[in-house]
């Protein structure tokens, strides 16, 4: 199972001092967080994509390429790549180039984005969010899987005899997650293609998360990619740790109360009861995180948000140290000890995807149910047809 951290790159004043980092300082802090993640043995670093204040990560592939040069093992990903407002042609180019620079240590998470004003800045309308996500992603798959693309759609100019360069490393596109917290259409899209589904398990109660993941799993099986429990699932989460629960809450409370995303609403205790936010000891974080599988099933990637709401970099690095040294080793062992046979322990990686033949559904632009089922053993395919 993969464990890592993700950042949204917010530039938020520290509520205890009133001082906000500069954009330059915030960018450097994101780099420091990635390097600390590798140092303590985490598997993944992911960055968000935002084009509006108070956020700085407007160019994720630039940052991830720089981190790739500084690291050896981290999988470099996005916590959202805006499939709606970015041109799929540019996404295809940027992430293929990143693949080459990082020697395959790359995947990405597609998301619609929910900041309305951003859409017109890129010539789009947020009311077209779902159709844009569907059309743009299908074009992206063609660009990564066909050497010459002829295409016409609704939201961009046609392509005639177009070749995207560079081609994906080893002719193997990066693995794609589809991230959504409330859109069943996106869960359906992930299932149709046999891609991963990531639920940012921060803002919602477990019943909602369970419902979204269940939908994805059921449709993944319907489309013939495997049994429902073999679907590739990732979750987010946020934690803050100290030697005692009281100490953790005392320190974290002003940051929670003033957080730009969820501050000025429910109390810390109310929010922690309703959502997966865990503020307490490492042992409490372990117990709470292990419980996620009780309602979403065994899953493959767990990312933690550690640097939100103005927390000082020194504190964030201490938190990642605790996460990597005390929490993740226990979680890794416990999750794997209870994982049923036949359920993937990790999401697909460049080496595993490179081993697939060209006729595998992963390499098809539109795998479809029959194409996917044709690759299953006969008894499994029969079961999925019923």
Image: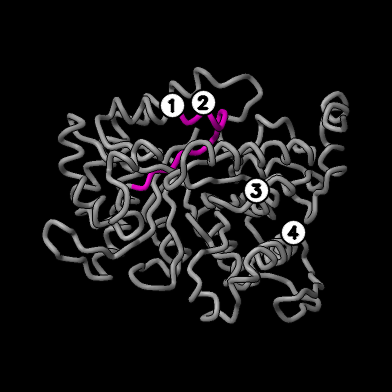
Is residue 298 on the magenta stretch?
yes
Label 1 packing within 10 angstroms: few (<14), some (14-19), many (20+): some
Q: Position of residue 300 (x, y in %)?
A: 54, 35
- Reading the image, the residue beneath label 2 is 294
2 or 4: tag closer to the N-terminus: 4
- Image side of residue 318 versus residue 33, left or right: left
Mark 1 lies on residue:
290
Q: Which of marks 2 and 1 is in front?
A: 2
Viewer-side label of 4, 1: 1
Q: In percent of the image, x 48 and y 76: which residue is there? A: 117
Percent coordinates x, y for residue 78 in the rendering: 49, 56
Question: Which mark, by number, is residue 380?
Answer: none
Q: State the CA–CA distance, disc 4 to disc 3.
A: 22 Å
Q: Distance between the residues labelled 2 and 3?
A: 20 Å
Closer to us: mark 4 or mark 3?
A: 3
**Are the residues flagged by discs 4 and 3 in contact, CB closer than 8 Å?**
no
Q: Where is residue 356 in the image (x, y as percent from the top left)?
A: 73, 41
- The reply to whether the C-beta atoms of the residues labelled 2 and 1 are less than 8 Å apart is yes
The residue that mark 3 highlights is: 187
């Amino acid at each position: 199972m993969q464990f890592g951290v993700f950042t949204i790159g917010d530039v938020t004043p520290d509520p205890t001092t009133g001082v906000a980092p500069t954009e330059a300082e915030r960018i450097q802090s994101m780099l420091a967080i990635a390097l600390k993640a590798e140092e303590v043995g985490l598997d993944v670093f992911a960055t968000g994509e935002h084009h509006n204040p108070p956020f700085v990560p407007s160019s994720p592939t630039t940052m991830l390429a720089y981190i790739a040069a500084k690291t050896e093992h981290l999988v470099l990903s996005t916590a959202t790549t805006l499939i709606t407002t970015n041109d799929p042609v540019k996404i295809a180019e940027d992430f293929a180039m990143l693949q080459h620079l990082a020697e395959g240590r790359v995947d990405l998470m597609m998301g619609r984005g929910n900041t309305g004003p951003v859409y017109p800045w890129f010539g789009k309308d947020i009311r077209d969010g779902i159709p844009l996500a569907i059309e743009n992603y299908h074009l992206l798959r063609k660009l990564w899987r066909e050497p010459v693309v002829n295409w016409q759609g609704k939201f961009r100019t046609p392509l005639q005899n177009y070749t995207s360069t560079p081609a994906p490393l080893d002719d193997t596109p990066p693995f794609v997650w589809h991230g959504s917290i409330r859109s069943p259409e996106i869960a359906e899209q992930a299932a149709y293609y046999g891609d991963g589904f990531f639920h940012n398990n921060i803002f919602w109660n477990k019943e909602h998360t369970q419902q979204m993941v269940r939908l994805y799993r059921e449709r993944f099986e319907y489309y013939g990619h495997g049994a429902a429990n073999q679907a590739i699932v990732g979750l987010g989460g946020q934690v803050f740790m100290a030697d005692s629960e009281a100490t953790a809450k005392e320190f974290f409370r002003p940051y929670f109360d003033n957080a730009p995303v969820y501050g000025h609403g429910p109390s810390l205790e109310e929010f922690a009861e309703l959502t997966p936010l865990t503020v307490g000891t490492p042992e409490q974080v372990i117990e709470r995180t292990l419980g996620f599988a009780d309602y979403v099933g065994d899953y493959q990637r767990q990312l933690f948000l550690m640097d939100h709401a103005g927390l000082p970099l020194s504190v964030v690095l201490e938190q990642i140290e605790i996460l990597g040294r005390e929490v993740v080793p226990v979680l890794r062992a416990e999750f794997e000890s209870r994982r049923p046979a036949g359920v993937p322990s990790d999401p697909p990686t460049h080496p595993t995807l490179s081993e697939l033949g060209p006729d595998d559904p992963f390499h098809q632009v539109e795998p479809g149910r029959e194409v996917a089922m044709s690759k299953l053993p006969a008894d499994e395919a029969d079961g999925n047809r019923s």
